[in-house]
Amino acid sequence: MSRTLIIIILVFCVSSCSKQLSKPSFISFITANDSIKVSFKNRYKCPLYAKITDKKTNKPAYVQLEAESEKVIQRFHKKNMNPSSILKTYKYVGYYGVLNTKGYDTSYNHVYPFRKTSSKIIQGYNGDFSHKGAFSSKSIDFELNVGDTIVASKPGIVIKMIVKHDKQGTTAEYRDYGNYIMIYHKDNTFSQYVHLKQYANLVNVGDIVEANQPIALSGFTGWTTIPHLHFGVYEPTKTGLESIPIIIDSIPAKSLKRGNIVTKD
């Protein structure tokens, strides 16, 4: 075997092992006496749940965490497991919200998520451009100008935001450049406001907001052909957040079709 081939094999093995044993940032290992514990740290100002999947059986288990809390989610004897073998055996994923609740308030009347008096719908539920799949299918795109004021559709707490981007493009490769704000609501739903103007947030993570309160300025960032606000409301499921049908200004949002002009009261 040539020296070059040996080096290639070694590099492949090292990179493969490193990928397999990578540890999620929210997981830590605690060694005490004869045991080793797996701890999950929730840094968000909303509940999370951990999904623990056995890689051999593909069988999942779920553990709930409160906002900004830390919990031991597994315990092993040091004779049987160590951090490396634990990571080889289990996969850890964190998801937003509380799992297995009775459901959200389907009758809640959201306000339109913008300050101006009217807007045109450029894409509604199940839109053929980008509103596909469980996460995006029940989202709405409101045509707005860059600099228009975005407001919260419902009271809640700001849990996450990305506002650093200034890129825009018409292909899916620009998806991750859309600035956004996410808000958690007390009925275990989440709302998201996307394509915001760079550094134009009017709130910060941890702020408690009211319905119709300004939270940001509309922009032209991420995967989009024209300036607009991408808006959706979500509930937790066993595979993460999924978009849900809602009521806006006493109108079922599913009835808002491309080309409709909506007017605020």
Image: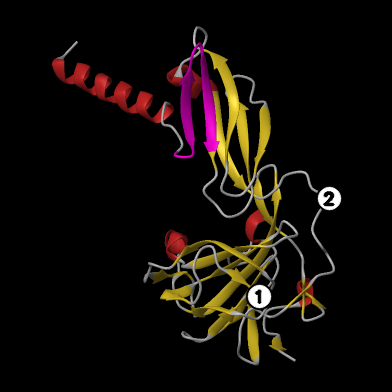
Q: Which quadrant would residue 193 be assigned to in this image?
A: bottom right
Q: Is residue 99 left or right of residue 85?
A: right
In the picture of the structure, the residue carrying the numbered disc 1 is 210
Please state which of residues 168 and 38 is positioned toward the viewer in this rendering: 38
Q: Is residue 57 left or right of residue 256?
A: left
Magenta stretch containing residue 43, yes or no? no
How far apart are the alpha carbons under marks 2 and 1? 24 Å
Colouring convention used in this rendered image of the protein: secondary structure
Return the disc, 2 or 1, that comes first in the chain's sequence: 2
Please state which of residues 74 and 265 is positioned toward the viewer in this rendering: 74
Residue 86's place in the image compared with 105, above or below, is above
Residue 48's place in the image compared with 14, above or below, is below
Residue 127's place in the image compared with 34, above or below, is below
Residue at 45 percent of width and 60 percent of height: 176
Q: Amino acid at mark 1?
A: Glu
Element marked by disc 1:
loop
Mark 2 neighbour class, 10 Å CA radius: few under 14, some 14 to 19, many 20 or more: few
In the picture of the structure, the residue carrying the numbered disc 2 is 102
Q: Closer to us: mark 2 or mark 1?
A: 1
Q: Which quadrant would residue 162 be assigned to in this image?
A: bottom left
Specify the segment rendered in magenta.
25-40
Mark 1 neighbour class, 10 Å CA radius: few under 14, some 14 to 19, many 20 or more: some
Residue contact between numbered discs 2 and 1, judged by CB atoms under 8 Å? no
Please state which of residues 228 and 147 is positioned toward the viewer in this rendering: 147
Residue 36's place in the image compared with 143, above or below, is above
Element marked by disc 2:
loop
Q: Please state, as top left, top right, bottom left or bottom right, where the N terminus lies in the image.
A: top left
Furthest-left residue in view? 3
- Residue 69, given in percent of the width and then of the height, sits at 57, 43
- Residue 265, given in percent of the width and then of the height, sits at 75, 91
Q: Amino acid at mark 2?
A: Lys
Residue at 62 percent of width and 70 percent of height: 231
